[in-house]
Amino acid sequence: MRFRLRNKRAFTIIEIVVSILVFSGFVLAVMFLYRRSSDSFKITAWKQERATQADIFWAQARKALEEATDRLEFVPGVINNPPLLKEPRPVKIHPSPGAAPDGNILAWNVSRTTYDMAGSNHTSVHNIYSIAKQKRRLIINGGSGRAPVLDDVVAIEFIVSSVTKTSNNAEEITAGINPAAVGTLLEISVTLAPPDGYIAGDLKIPISHKFRLNVAPFSDSAPTY
């Protein structure tokens, strides 16, 4: 009687080591791709959040800045067509907002007047607005409702031009601050960057907006009213 022996093949140590290395490489590749995908999603979400913030922030800034006025008050005791008293309220601008400590870097007044055509209840309402720094955040203070904010601001610059009137009542625009100006052209430039630990840590997003104010400019290292 013949007995047929079957060969039983076992895994060698080398084969096991190679298998482990191949599997480990596969796992590392999957983890790398997952991390890249997660980081990409994170930076995309950050951009979307800042874009939404910026839309609200700049819309409110434009409305408030372009409503800037001197302080306007009705002459007391005059019932019919009372004239307005005007007290200068220039826009106060920090000369170096990027290097300024936390606090106001811009401040201005908005006066709203209402004539009561049926009686003598003429009113003047005054609001003080400001843009303040809090570390990497800008905040618009003043008015009603929740204060708009813009986060992750790493640089800010003001470019100021003065609007003056010539002898023939034409407008003339000159760079810099002129106390005799009748208006101000203000460009606000900021740079946004993601927080530490984000992918693309060298990412910078510059944003610039221009505004016209109907009040004179004034340089102030602590803008307030």
Image: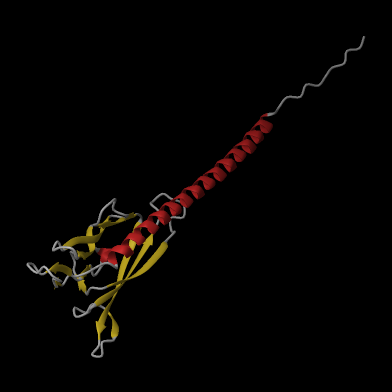
Q: Quick check: 31 left or right of 192?
A: right
Q: Which residue is outermost to the bottom?
A: 168
Q: Which residue is outermost to the front?
A: 118
Closest to the observer: 223 or 167?
A: 167
- Which percent across, then down, holds residue 5? 84, 17
- Which percent across, then down, holds residue 61? 31, 62
Q: Is residue 77 above or below residue 200?
A: below
Identify the residue at horizontal 38%, vertical 52% (top origin): 195
Q: Which residue is outermost to the right?
A: 1
**Picture quarter with the C terminus:** bottom left
Closest to the observer: 27 or 166?
A: 166
Q: Quadrant of residue 81?
A: bottom left
Q: Quick check: 29 left or right of 224?
A: right
Q: Quadrant of residue 59?
A: bottom left
* Number of numbered labels in the structure image: 0
Identify the residue at horizontal 39%, vertical 64% (top origin): 207
Q: Quadrant of residue 165?
A: bottom left
**Picture quarter with the N terminus:** top right
Q: Is residue 1 above or below residue 26?
A: above
- Which percent across, then down, holds residue 219? 20, 71
Colouring scheme applied when the structure was drawn: secondary structure
Closest to the observer: 192 or 74?
A: 74
